[in-house]
Amino acid sequence: DAQAQGRHIGRYVLLRRLGSGAMGDVYAAYDPELDRNVALKLLRARRHTKAAASEGQQRLLREARAMAQLRAANVVAVHDAGVHDDQVYVAMELVEGRTLKDWLAVEPRGWREIMAVFILAGRGLAAAHAKDLVHRDFKPENVMVGADGRAQVMDFGLARTTVAGAGEAGERDDEGDHAETESGSSSLRLTRAGAIVGTPAYMAPEQWSGQMADARSDQFSYCVALWEALYGQRPFAGDNAAAIAFSVTAGTLREPRSPRRVPSWMRTILARGLEVSPERRWPSMLALLDAFEHAQLRRRRRKWLLGLACGAALLGGLASARTWDRQRRVSACEAEAATIGEVWNPEVAASLGARFVEVNGQSRAGLAETTVVKLRPWFDRWIEAWQRARTHSCLGATVEKTIAPALA
């Protein structure tokens, strides 16, 4: 907005508003000392006493500075934090892109494309957990997808501390009765007196009871978000906070309904991450991501083996076809060579003897028969040689391809 443009927050100069939510306002800002643009979040504190406000500010600063120690490819980097006019600000990496929520909404996505982005976001959570940092409010709105497709998680640890002065041991808010809604029930943040703080649609059962959220709570929220992205609806029914709380704490999963062909192993893996008891979930985000990777490897291996089997069957079929075709051609050549039998056979030999007798008369019948007896072996050998030669030339032309068909 025009009033914010050019305003100084600490050493930063506000350029334009990027967005606004329950936690505060986000601006694109310029850092003149390091000559770079940043995203500057001005966090809202709602305590009424100066002591409580100061306590809340210090808590926010501690967590922001802890986040500044984390450098991971899939986490939006925190550069700096401070207080300006009693308002905490956090300077973060400026990501050119859109939130995961908007990325999912802008066009239809296949399950593999969705998985690729969520695995990157999961790595961001795992990197933070390795540094003992917990998000506490993971949801699609808290993930940025850059123009290069890289997913980065943001707002680690700030969800709980947006309520200034929240106790260290739990996550309950003791400020005045109110609730805030950003854009419907999916973004509703509970901040009523004595109530838990978070986004109901993605909160783990232990968060509903006001217990301290840990890495397993982030895992639960992550699985809710991924289920929603894959199946088009959240795993737990409910149009309001009370209904959602009932479904979540009862562990009642909806049956997935999706036009996408999501593999069945996906539901099995996600269902474990959505267990009511944290102890029954995956041991860590890395274990969950490994389960995805191994399932996809098994799927690719099965497809490879199926392809190999089909290929072997095809090759076997081709080999059988070639063998059958060769046998057919050989038989055809042998049959063609056998046609000489129509020219010379026992019947023809007998008729030849009769013709000799007829020509030479009965007085010389003995000589005629003797002549035929002597000639017949010669004719038989000649016929056999002709058959072999004819078979050889036929095979050379049609089977072995060693003789030109015109010469066969």
Image (cartoon, helix red, strand yellow):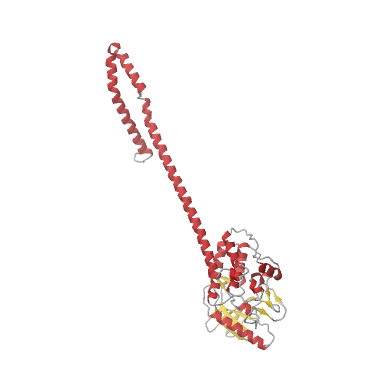
Residue 83, can we see it?
yes
Residue 99, can we see it?
no
Residue 343 rendering spot, x and y as whole percentages? 36, 25
Q: In the figure, residue 7 lies in which quadrant?
A: bottom right
Q: Which quarter of the image is occupied by the N terminus?
A: bottom right
Q: Residue at x 27, y 22 (%)?
A: 374
Residue 17 rendering spot, x and y as whole percentages? 63, 77
Q: Is residue 302 above or below residue 30?
A: above
Can you name the residue that lies furthest to the top here? 363
Q: Residue at x 50, y 59 (%)?
A: 300
Residue 396 rendering spot, x and y as whole percentages? 35, 38
Q: In the figure, residue 244 lies in which quadrant?
A: bottom right
Front-lying residue, 177 or 91: 177
Q: In the figure, residue 106 lies in which quadrant?
A: bottom right
Q: Is residue 184 above or below residue 374?
A: below
Left or right: residue 73 versus residue 243 is: left
Residue 408 rendering spot, x and y as whole percentages? 35, 35
